[in-house]
Image (spheres, rainbow, N blue to C red):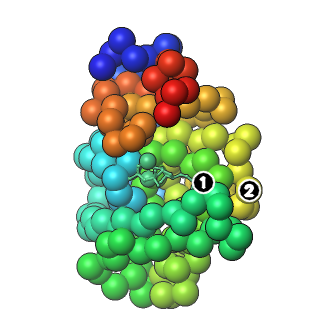
Amino acid sequence: MNEDIKEILYSKEQIEEISKKIGAQLTIDYAGKKPLVICVLKGAILFMADIIRKMDTYTEIDFMDVSSYGDSTVSSGEVKIIKDLDVPVEGRNVLIIEDIIDTGKTLQCIVSLLKHRKAQSVKICTLLDKPERRVEGVVPNYVGFQVPNEFVVGYGLDYQGMYRNLPYVGILKEEIYENN
Ligand code: PRP
Ligand code: MN
Ligand code: MG
C-alpha cells in the first residue's frame, strides 16, 4: 500500500502533535460545556479517536453518515443522510469532527441541519482543509493542516474505499487513479 504514495504530506508524528495541540485548546474551550462530538463517517474516525482522547472534559460522542449526490446534481450542497445521530442536539454544544473539508458541501449541509435542530452552538474541527476547492462558505474553527489541491489519502481519507488505514496523510500516485 505504501508504494502507491508519491509523497508523505503529514507524518504520524506531525498528526499526533497537532491532535495534542487542538485537544488542549478544546479542553479549554469546552470546559463545563459537556459537548456532543460528532464524527462524520467514515473519513473522520481516526482523527475523532485521537481528538476525544486529548479532550479532558465530559464528552459525549455520536456518529453521522451522509452521502453527497455528486457534482452532477444541479442543487449544490444536497446530501442524503445515511445514518442520523442517535442523540438529540437541541441545546447542545456540538463539535463536528472531519478528516477534510473540500468543497464544503458536506459540512454546509450538516451544520444547517444541526442549527435547524436548535443546537446551542456548532463548531467544526478538521484535520485537513483544502480551501482552494471551497464553494460553500464553510469556515472551520479548528484546523490541523492545510493541503494543496492534490489527491490526498490516509488517516481516514480514501480512494475507492482504500488507504484509510495509512497512519499518515500522503499524495496518491497519479498512475493509481488515472486509468479509472
Ligand atoms: C469526504 C471527506 C469529507 C467530504 C469533504 O467524505 O471525508 O467528509 O468528502 O468533501 P466536501 O467538502 O466537498 O463535501 P466522503 O463523502 O468521500 O465519504 P467518506 O468519509 O466515507 O470517505
Ligand atoms: Mn467524509
Ligand atoms: Mg471518501
Query: Is residue 35 placed above or below 56 in the rendered structure?
Result: below
The answer to whether residue 6 is seen in the rendering is yes
Give the camera-side residue of 24 and 43.
43
Q: Which residue is drawn at 65% across and 61% down?
A: 72
**Image quarter for residue 83?**
bottom left
Dot 1 beta carbon under 8 Å from ligand 1? no
Q: Which amino acid does label 1 sit on?
A: Pro
Dot 1 falls on a residue whose secondary structure is loop
The answer to whether residue 15 is seen in the rendering is no
Kindly identify which residue carries mark 1: 140
Q: Residue at x 33, y 16 (%)?
A: 2
Image spot of residue 147 (x, y percent): 61, 32
Q: Which of marks 1 and 2 is nearer the N terminus?
A: 2
Image spot of residue 89 (x, y percent): 39, 82
Q: Specify whether 51 is left or right of 75.
A: left
Q: Specify whether 122 is left or right of 63.
A: right
Kindly identify which residue carries mark 2: 135
